[in-house]
Image (cartoon, rainbow, N blue to C red):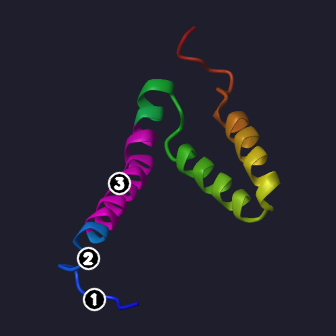
Amino acid sequence: MTYTHGICENLRPSLEKLLQVFFVGLTIGVQRTVIPALAETEFGVVQGSITTIFALVTWRNHTRPDAARRLASIVSGGILAMPSGRSPWG
């Protein structure tokens, strides 16, 4: 089996990888800029708390095994996302 090297010979996989990296960058950018600003303006969340929640959930996911990680992430994310006494809906 022979392999060919270079972007021209492997244009489709190279473009797919470039597109994938672009979308991952967009997702991370939205998570770090748009979501905290939206949470602050629309839901009255204190500035910086969304970033702290993302960091805590990420840290917790890296310290637990796979089976427990998924459930713990869903439950802890739901608990942390609950409003604390102040609701914009009344």
User: Of label 2 and label 3, which has the lower sequence position?
Assistant: 2
Measuring from the top left, give residue 86's x and y in whole percent.
62, 20
Q: Amino acid at mark 3?
A: Phe
Q: CA distance from mark 1 to mark 2?
A: 7 Å
Give the class, few, some or many, for how many residues have Cα within 10 Å of label 2's Cα (few <14, many ≥20).
few
Q: Amino acid at mark 1?
A: His
Q: Nearer the viewer, residue 6 or 62?
A: 6
Is residue 26 toward the left or the right of residue 49 in the image? left
The residue tagged 3 is 23
What distance separates the C-alpha of mark 3 from that of mark 1?
Answer: 25 Å
Q: Secondary structure at mark 2?
A: loop
Residue 81: x and y in percent read 64, 34
Quadrant of the frame with the C terminus: top right
What is the spatial separation of the Cα atoms under label 2 and label 3, in whole angstroms?
20 Å
Q: Nearer the viewer, mark 2 or mark 3?
A: 2
Question: In this view, which residue lies farthest toward the front?
Answer: 1
**Can you give x and y, in whole percent of width and height, for residue 18 in the image?**
29, 66
Which label lies toward us, 3 or 1?
1
Which residue position is annotated with label 2? 10
Residue 37 vertical position relative to residue 90 in the rendered view, above or below: below
State the residue position of label 1. Answer: 5
Is residue 43 positioned above or below 33 on the image? above
Give amino acid for label 2.
Asn
Q: Is residue 18 within the magenta segment?
A: yes
User: Counting residues from the N terminus, which is met first, the one under dot 1 or under dot 2?
Assistant: 1
Q: Quadrant of the N terminus?
A: bottom left
Q: Are marks 1 and 2 in contact (CB under 8 Å)?
A: yes
Range drawn in magenta: 15-37
Residue occupying the point 55% across, 44% down: 50
Q: Residues within 10 Å of mark 3 (few under 14, many from 20)?
A: few
Above/below status of 73 relative to 4: above
